[in-house]
Image (cartoon, coloured by chain):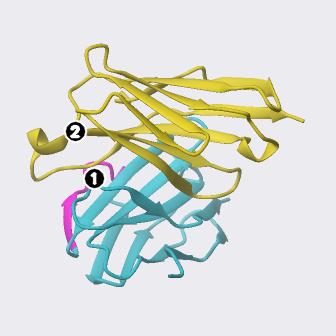
Chain colours: A cyan, B yellow
Amino acid sequence: DAGVIQSPRHEVTEMGQEVTLRCKPISGHNSLFWYRQTMMRGLELLIYFNNNVPIDDSGMPEDRFSAKMPNASFSTLKIQPSEPRDSAVYFCASSLRRSTYEQYFGPGTRLTVT
Amino acid sequence: SQQGEEDPQALSIQEGENATMNCSYKTSINNLQWYRQNSGRGLVHLILIRSNEREKHSGRLRVTLDTSKKSSSLLITASRAADTASYFCATDPGISNFGNEKLTFGTGTRLTIIP
């Protein structure tokens, strides 16, 4: 299995631009998670899905952030408009069955907003 | 606040020595997991210990769990340079939080193995 796939791996954009991060979970996994990691705040859960349905989005910082999972093999995290404080590494992870089984992380997307 | 808090925040030891990291948490759990993160990479699952287990081994890793003290420890024996990474504990609240089950990650211990 190729593991969790994220794209792009690096994104540099200007403040105010729209950013879309993409994730392909491991085939057969029913839960998908979006995390953000910074030195200051550590690893934060933004949102997670079970069977393509958003279960908990309480970690989404603002309305500028949105996430979708149109099918079992694809999810997006969108930031519109982006701000410098959104600069971070964004990880996607997937899990088999129950959401609290071991999670498999993607390589992350390093986002820099100037 | 973080459910899991690792201690110490940073640890440097000589290659070949044992490394011990601790994790404390606040609420009851179903299981506790340890993850490793190499610089610039995603987290990798290492081991899971259930609330009814006290100790678990996997290769050079030994994990203990004390639910009465709400704490866990991760021991890496005979450390190697490749063990240099950040280590995170993550807690699973279990069915008490049914319908909104999610892992909560700690702040991590940064381990450096000196060759």
In which quarter of the view is residue B80 placed?
A: top right
**Could you say which is closer to the camera, residue B20 or residue A64?**
B20
**Could you say which is closer to the camera, residue B48 or residue A44?**
B48
Chain containing the residue with disc 2: B
Find out whether the residues at labels 2 and 1 contact each other: C-beta distance under 8 Å.
yes
Locate residue B13 relative to residue A33 in the image: left or right. Answer: right
**Could you say which is closer to the camera, residue B66 or residue A112?**
B66
Q: Magenta span covers which residues?
A: A53-61
Does residue B50 lie above or below A12 as drawn?
A: above
Q: Disc 2 to disc 1, how far (Cα)?
A: 9 Å
Which residue is drawn at the image coordinates 29% and 83% (left, top)? A72
Locate residue B97 relative to residue B33 in the image: left or right. Answer: left
In which quarter of the view is residue B65 placed?
A: top left
Q: Secondary structure at mark 1?
A: loop
Q: Secondary structure at mark 2?
A: loop
**Could you say which is closer to the camera, residue B59 or residue B101?**
B59
- Disc 2 residue type? Asn
Q: Nearer the viewer, mark 2 or mark 1?
A: 2
Q: Is residue A63 visible?
A: yes
Q: Is residue A41 visible?
A: no
Q: Quadrant of the C terminus of chain A?
A: bottom right
Q: Is residue A54 magenta?
A: yes
In which quarter of the view is residue B83 placed?
A: top right
Determine crowd level at label 2: few under 14, some 14-19, many 20+ residues with C-alpha closer than 10 A.
some
Q: Which residue is mark 2?
A: B30
Q: Is residue A72 magenta?
A: no
Could you say where residue A48 lies in the image, as x and y percent from the top left? Answer: 29, 61
Could you say where residue B89 lies in the image, as x and y percent from the top left? Answer: 45, 36
Does residue A89 lie above or below B72 as drawn?
A: below
Could you say where residue B22 lies in the image, as x and y percent from the top left? Answer: 50, 23
- Disc 1 residue type? Thr
Q: Which residue is mark 1?
A: A100
